[in-house]
Amino acid sequence: MNPLIVEIKNVSFAYSGQAVLQDVSLDIRMSDFIAMIGPNGGGKTTLLKLILGLLKPNRGTIRVMGEATQKASHHIGYVPQNVNINQNFPITAMDVVMMGKLEPGRGWKRPKASDREDAMAVIDRMEMTPFASRRIAELSGGQRQRIFIARALVTKPQLLLLDEPTASIDTKGQTDFYKLLKELNKDITILVVSHDLLVISTYAKSMACMNRRLHYHNQNEITGDMLKSMYACTVEEVCPVELISHIHTNRVANE
Amino acid sequence: MIEAMQFEFMRNALMAGLLASIICGIMGTFVVVNRIVFLSGGIAHAAYGGIGLAFYFGWPFLLGTIGFSLASAMLMAAITLTAKHRADSIIGVIWALGMAFGIILMDLTPGYNVDLMSYLFGSILSVPRSDLWIMVGLGFLITALVALYYQNLLAMSYDEEFARIRGVPVKTLYFLLIGMLAVSIVLVIQVVGLILVIALLTIPPLMMEKYAKSLFQMMIGSSIAGALFTIIGLWLSYTCNLTSGASIIMVSGVAYFISLLVNQILMISKNRYKTDAGKIKNSSSPSL
């Protein structure tokens, strides 16, 4: 078995008394590619934030690379769901990516020339080179998302956490993006939150369904049981294919 | 204006205004991008409590004011970090309380009373040389600290969550930022008054935010803009015999609204150009 990257044991979490996670356990091992699905408010983002040490569990433990979460967070590349924060901030795309070069205990040291080269290389990989010196406000939502992904990649992470990373990328871009993830997965462990069941079944190795409780499936097929536990209806009421097409049309409609 | 420079008080006033512009240009950039204008107002007003304390107990003026302002600023910073959703209301409470506390202490202090107006609008025309040196020292200290921690302050201001993940000590930095802000506000208030401090902290950075590509550019631009407003304001106050602080603020405010208007016009003409280009493209496509 591959070495453990993240070990989540019986974790519960509540926002002001409202239980969001209940008794969640999950092992993430090296070179995993886990897709996490679940309804809105099911606790997906909360789980990511717990792994990152941004939140502390009420009960249970989380270890990342054998360390406490807050100490280990710099091993993790994170792409947040909302890439439109602080849109008018005076900052270039390049400088956003350079944030990934910050390290604990770095203090006041200036960024090195090699840091800039690394950042440029990742920006190039995301096909964003012509936009590197643009202000972040001038980029489209999809372009901004690529920059945020570049920022996560430039940290050379052991684990990549992505929260609905393709939300504002067009269909072709999405396919390219998941191909890129598959390639990255050769040396990086990936946990991605997505609603796109088709994409998941093509690229992910395993699945986690999150709806207050977590159900882990060591395969990437969508079964009736999974849907039943996730969405409050039986397979008879909503057939999986219908659900997939439903989600799909919703996504298209949103674009 | 040249003839006005014969007078030492005018030279000092100009120096004080320029130094205040630089300090406010740097700190104001952080104030605007971190959206802590209200907190700055809170610090500036609550500082009056410190002035009252210093007078009542006969402490050295700067020691009392800076001590009290730092304490109230740290309290406000702690509240902003822990109870974000109620932070503005609680800052409002501290704002009012600090001011009232100062006034009551002044009432209780026998003899000489400080004029509230000079605290609000300062007395830039009567700045002593010693105050200029204090401002020079402060300017250097702030520039050095901001230069040292620039990358971390930038990361915290843009995306606090990501900065925390990268191991940036966000809490410590935030307290450092608010501490620097409190000290700057107190020192600059002495010279140019509370209202001018708020104006210099917000107006130049707000104007520059749209054009700057980095916080550094925004700081440089704000300092230059602030300095220009100060020079023009002082010249107006000298030639038209107006209150100096208020003149500088009027110049800044008018410049801000002109920049807004120019921006709007630019936007409209840009959009018109775009739609015109689109029409030409559409009309030409069938013939191709």
Image (cartoon, rainbow, N blue to C red):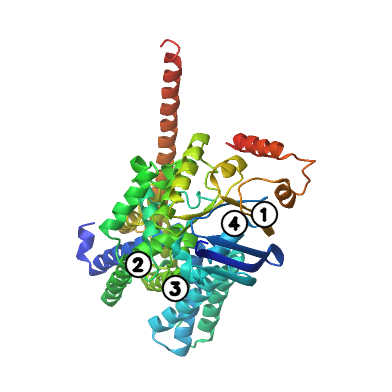
**Image position of A80 with respect to A109: above or below:** above
Picture coordinates of residue B228 (x, y %)? 30, 54
Q: Percent x, y for residue B103?
A: 53, 78
Mark 4: few, some, or many residues within 10 Å (few <14, many ≥20)?
many
Indicate the position of residue B76 as horizontal and vertical percent values. Answer: 53, 72
Q: Are marks 2 and 3 on the same chain?
A: yes
Task: Please give the chain letter of the residue carrying mark 4.
Answer: A
At x 66% / y 64%, what residue is drawn? Answer: A24
Q: Are marks 3 and 1 on the same chain?
A: no
Q: CA distance from mark 1 to mark 4?
A: 9 Å
From where the camera sits, is residue B16 visible?
Answer: yes
Q: Nearer the viewer, mark 3 or mark 1?
A: 1
| Nearer the camera: disc 1 or disc 2 | 1
Dot 4 corresponds to which residue? A45
Between A136 and B73, the one lying in front of the other is: A136
Give the secondary structure at mark 3. Answer: helix
Dots 2 and 4 on the same chain: no
**Numbered disc 4: secondary structure:** helix
Question: In this view of the protein, which residue sits in the foreground, A24 or A113?
Answer: A24
The residues tagged by marks 3 and 4 sit, at their Cα atoms, a distance apart of 26 Å
Q: Is residue A51 above or below residue B206?
A: below
Q: Which mark is residue A41?
A: 1
Amino acid found under the numbered disc labelled 3 = Thr
Answer above or below: position of A125 versus B12: above
Label 2 secondary element: loop
Distance from Cα at disc 2 to Cα at disc 4 = 30 Å
The residue at which mark 2 appears reads as: B149
Are the residues at dot 2 and dot 3 in contact (C-beta closer than 8 Å)?
no
Return the mark for residue B80. Answer: none
> Which residue is tagged 3?
B172
Q: Amino acid at mark 1?
A: Gly
